[in-house]
Structures are given as C-alpha cells and as structure tokens.
Amino acid sequence: MNTKIIGKLVKKARKKQNFTQAEAAGYLNIGTRFLSDLENGKPTIRLEKTLQVLEGIGFNILIIPKSNHKLTRYIADHLNEE
C-alpha cells in the first residue's frame, strides 16, 4: 500500500458517489487542495486527515500484522471479488 494506491481508491469512491472534489471536500470538512493532493498520491499528506477522508468516504480501516499470513491472504483474495 502506498499513497498512489490510496489516492486512486479515494478518487474512485468519490466518483462512484457522484461527488466533485469540491462537494466531497465540503462534506468531509477538508480543503479541496488536500483532497486533490491525496487523490494524486502526494507522499507527504497528513495521516490524520487521510484517515478522516477514508472513513468519511466509506472505507473501513484495518491494520493486520504481516505475520498473520492466513488472514492477509484471505482478505486479499476476497477484495478482488468486488
């Protein structure tokens, strides 16, 4: 996972909900510049705001230790089903 992938996920979710960047930024209580930077994968974006956007746009955030191979594999396999 990196900022480019997160940005693509956010942009896809925003467009799926038929929000412009300005509308989404207003709804999420963030600036349009931040949302644009996030969607474009800027590597220095603020984590707290990024988490706020991810939750606000409909993502669950889950952190799994790499050592939990079984769960990681299960999740990766089932994410592709969407």
Image (cartoon, rainbow, N blue to C red):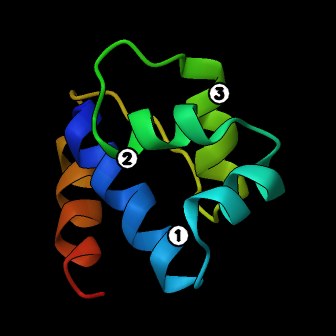
Q: Between disc 1 and disc 2, whose residue precedes?
A: 1
User: Disc 1 vs disc 3: Cβ atoms closer than 8 Å?
Assistant: no
Q: Is there a contact, CB below 8 Å, between mark 1 and mark 2? A: yes
Q: CA distance from mark 1 to mark 2?
A: 10 Å
Q: Which residue corresponds to mark 2?
A: 39
Residue at 55%, 31% in the rendered image: 34
Mark before the other along the chain sequence, 2 or 3: 2
Answer above or below: position of 81 versus 71.
below
Where, by quadrant of the figure, is residue 58 drawn? bottom right
Residue 78 marker: none
Q: Which residue is mark 1?
A: 14
Name which quarter of the figure residue 31 lies in: top right
Q: Nearer the viewer, residue 60 or 74?
A: 60
Task: Tell me residue 63's x, y (percent).
Answer: 45, 35
Task: For marks 2 and 3, give the CA distance.
Answer: 13 Å
Seen from the viewer's position, the closer of residues 22 and 79 is: 22
| Residue 49: image tag | 3
Report the residue at 26% width, 76% height from top.
Answer: 78
For the point 48% across and 84% down, the residue is 16
The kind of secondary structure element at disc 2 is helix
Q: Say which label, 1 or 3, has the lower sequence index.
A: 1
Q: Is residue 52 above or below residue 56?
A: above
Position of residue 55 relative to residue 47, above or below, is below
Q: Mark 1: give few (<14), some (14-19) or many (20+) Cα within 10 Å.
A: some
Q: The residue under label 2 is which amino acid type?
A: Glu
Other residues around mark 2 within 10 Å, as few (<14) / some (14–19) / many (≥20): many
* Amino acid residing under circle 1: Arg
